[in-house]
Image (spheres, rainbow, N blue to C red):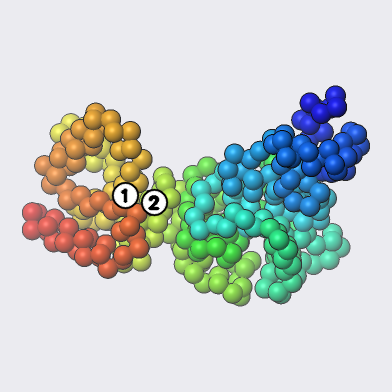
Amino acid sequence: MVGGVELELIARQGVFSARDALRAGIDGRALSLLCHRSVCTRLTHGWYAVGVPDSQRDRHRLTAIALSRAYEGAALPSHSSVLVLLDLPLHGVDLATVHLTRLPAPDTSPPKPWSGQSRRRAGLLLHRGQDGVDHNTVSARPGLPLTVPVAHAVVGAGLVGRATGALVAADAALTRGLVTRAELDGAIAAFDGHRGVGPVRAALRDADGRHESPGESLAAHVLAGLGHELQPQFEVVAEGRTYRADFRIAGTRVLVEFDGRVKYESGDRAVLFEEKRREDALRRAGWVVVRLVWSDLTSPDLVRARIQRALGQAAAAA
């Protein structure tokens, strides 16, 4: 409480402006003191968060909310900032920069996204309007500011970051029902001609809501790039039990598992024993299992050699 005022009462979605504070009797000097005491945090010029963000991602989220309010609906969170707001997985995202996209005036046609009319300032990249993004297509979700359509944000994130970042986000968004395949295709078409859209388009060909983690998304992308057709979340019955593998190389007895190490970090011996028993049962049933880890995904030649060796072993055992 500050001078009888609860900051939470003047904040919306965790943020408030210097003007909001002043109306509540808290001037700039008092705000500076509150920031020094970690009662609130300055996010950007004229905007503050209640308390202290608990991570860089949380700070980005709060700053995106603040900036969207500062532009009063004339510009909306877009690109990777929408992924942050929706709690989608991030890959290759610069959390130091918030992305907003201007909305065209209701009586004008939106300019092409490759017109080069973006403006940058510290911590903010303000994009000119995109095809397919106007007042009739904004995305509204409870508890969040209005944003550009999720599909456009996914493609945009790949353009300002890594192409595979769009894939990781797309897979999670498909799983959660936030986008459809048709919406992704439409967003890619809207960015046609934009510099860098080719790699994003190629990455999103592998988008599949059955991929259950960023590691699986990236592993599928590498394997597809090597020419393999995959069956994600493939069920195998071995020794009376049903197991699910991350991928099957279609038409073969080769299974591919991505190990993100999360299940092993607890050091629980029961977890390790069950994983070994599972793999032993699969091998006895005639399946060849290839395990990939994060470092393998940066060495496609290594992955190619391991898959080819496994395919050879499966063929010899047939």
Camera-side residue of 163 and 43 = 43
Quarter of the image for residue 244 reads top left
Q: Looking at the picture, how far across and down is residue 19, in whole percent?
A: 88, 43
Q: Disc 2 residue type?
A: Gly
Camera-side residue of 34 and 221 = 34
The residue that appears at 43% across and 50% down in the rendered structure is: 214
Taking 51 as reference, is 228 left or right? left
Q: Disc 1 residue type?
A: Phe
Whether residue 72 can be seen here: yes
User: Which residue, given by chain and number where applicable, does mark 1 sit on?
Assistant: 258
Mark 1: few/some/many CA within 10 Å (<14, 14-19, 20+) = many
Check whether the beta carbons of the residues at disc 2 and disc 1 lie within 8 A of each other. Answer: yes
Q: CA distance from mark 2 to mark 1?
A: 7 Å
Taking 269 as reference, is 15 left or right? right
Taking 170 as reference, is 231 left or right? left
Q: Given the current orientation, which residue lies at the most extreme top position? A: 4
Whether residue 234 can be seen here: no
User: Which residue, given by chain and number where applicable, does mark 2 sit on?
Assistant: 215
Quarter of the image for residue 99 reads bottom right
Q: Looking at the picture, how far across and down is residue 133, in whole percent?
A: 71, 59
Locate the C terminus by quadrant: bottom left
Mark 2: few/some/many CA within 10 Å (<14, 14-19, 20+) = some
